[in-house]
Amino acid sequence: MKKTRDLVLTAMFIALGVTLPQAFHAIPNAGGIFLPMHIPVLVAGFVVGPVFGLAAGILTPVLSHLIFHMPPAAVLPGMLCELAMYGLATGFFARIIKTKNVLLKIYAVLILGMLAGRVTYGILNSLIFRAGSYSMQAWLSAAFITALPGIIIQLIVIPVLLLALSRAKLIKI
């Protein structure tokens, strides 16, 4: 029954990851600023674990691209790898980090997962997807400076959401 539950929840997170960004695309570059697709994938890792989190991270940008043509084809490979790492790393760290302080665990897992995804994005862009035209400055700018509003939103919204789900006994952190 747990696998069925996780499969259904993964499908829900993918659906949220595909539809939520549509509310932001009326604003130029809003996807890269507010990072709305990242939130459901990061939460998926926490809730359904690394394997289903990885699946959510892969399928969300692919389906969004196929349905809405966002992210654009040039951005899709790097973003797919970044989101896949978010789901995988967040699920992995949520399973191995043990502490009685739930908020500390949430923030540790979230920050480690976010860093793993951003580092993956930077390494793969510099070595494969944009080799020769991708610099440390471009990575820092895209992953941290432009994305700062989205990072702040993630650091506020995701812990609140996870704590609410935990208090309602819908998930165990």
Image: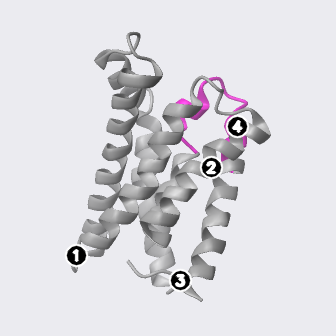
So how many labels did they put on this image? 4
**Cα distance in 3D space between marks 4 and 3:** 31 Å
Which numbered disc, 4 or 3, marks the residue that appears first in the sequence?
4
Which numbered disc, 1 or 2, marks the residue that appears first in the sequence?
2
Residue 60 is tagged as 2
Task: Please report the residue visible at 60 percent of the width from the left and 22 percent of the height from the top.
Answer: 74
Which numbered disc, 4 or 1, marks the residue that appears first in the sequence?
4
Magenta region: which residues? Answer: 20-36
Which numbered disc, 3 or 1, marks the residue that appears first in the sequence?
1
**Quadrant housing residue 148:** top left
Q: Which residue bears the numbered disc 3?
A: 170
Query: Is residue 25 inside the magenta stretch?
Result: yes
Secondary structure under tag 3 reads: loop
Nearer mark to the viewer, of 2 and 3: 2
Nearer mark to the viewer, of 3 and 1: 1
Secondary structure under tag 2 reads: helix
Residue 65 is tagged as 4
Q: Is residue 118 above or below residue 85?
A: above
